[in-house]
Image: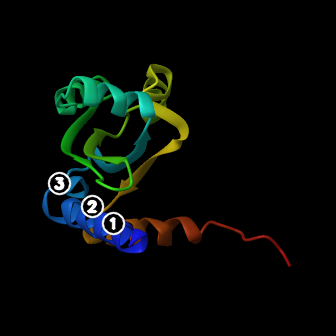
């Protein structure tokens, strides 16, 4: 059952990233990210005592970091929060992570920020890699 839960969560996030979130790769000024975090027990305790929509707080936090939230989801059985966002290329993702760790909302080591790109973005990255590899000298064996 646990494997099925992880699979369903992964598929739903992937579908969200593909169909819900705007594709920032089309916009050369932003990068798309999927943020994953496991909230602390205190966060869930406060949500039980006083249920609240955490989305508006996430919007403000991300905006201050130079990002626009495009989706906010809670994994039902894995306690993970998933946030989809488009961030300015100069957004300080480390500062965003420090803020979440420092606030006590997330435990250090339980949060990930994954930059995602479209297939068109993959093609552009491949072209850029061709330019880079022509100047790269691999280690000698």
Q: At 43% from the left edge and 43% from the top edge, which residue is drawn? A: 38
| Residue 31 position (above or below residue 66) | below
Relative to 81, residue 20 above or below: below
The answer to which quarter of the image holds residue 12 is bottom left
- Which image quarter: residue 120? bottom left
Q: Position of residue 35 (x, y in %)?
A: 37, 46
The nearer-to-camera label among 2 and 3 is 2
Which numbered disc flags the more N-terminal residue, 3 or 1? 1
Q: Position of residue 66 (x, y in %)?
A: 29, 30
Q: SS class of the residue under badge 3? A: loop
Q: How would you rate the neighbour count of disc 3 (Cα within 10 Å): few for under 14, some for 14-19, many for 20 or more? A: some
Q: Label 2 crowding class (10 Å Cα cut-off): few <14, some 14-19, many 20+?
A: many
Find the residue positioned furthest to the right. Answer: 141
- For mark 2, give the secondary structure: helix
Q: Quadrant of residue 138?
A: bottom right
Q: CA distance from mark 1 to mark 2?
A: 5 Å
Per the rendering, the mark at residue 27 is: none
Q: Are marks 1 and 2 in contact (CB under 8 Å)?
A: yes
Q: Residue at 35% across / 34% down in the picture?
A: 44
In the depicted structure, whether residue 82 falls above or below residue 68:
below
Number of the label disc, if any, that sits on residue 13: 2
């Amino acid at each position: 059952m646990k494997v099925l839960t992880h699979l369903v969560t992964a598929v739903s996030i992937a579908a969200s990233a593909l169909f819900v979130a705007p594709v920032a790769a089309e916009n050369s000024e932003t990068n798309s990210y999927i943020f994953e975090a496991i909230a602390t027990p205190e966060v869930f305790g406060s949500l039980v005592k006083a249920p609240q929509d955490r989305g508006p707080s996430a919007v403000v936090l991300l905006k201050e970091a130079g990002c626009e939230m495009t989706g906010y989801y809670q994994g039902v059985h894995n306690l993970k929060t998933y946030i989809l966002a488009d961030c300015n290329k100069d957004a300080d993702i480390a500062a965003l992570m420090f803020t979440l760790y420092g606030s006590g909302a997330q435990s250090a080591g339980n949060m990930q920020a994954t930059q995602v790109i479209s297939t068109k973005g993959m093609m552009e990255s491949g072209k850029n890699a061709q330019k880079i590899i022509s100047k790269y000298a691999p280690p000698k064996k």
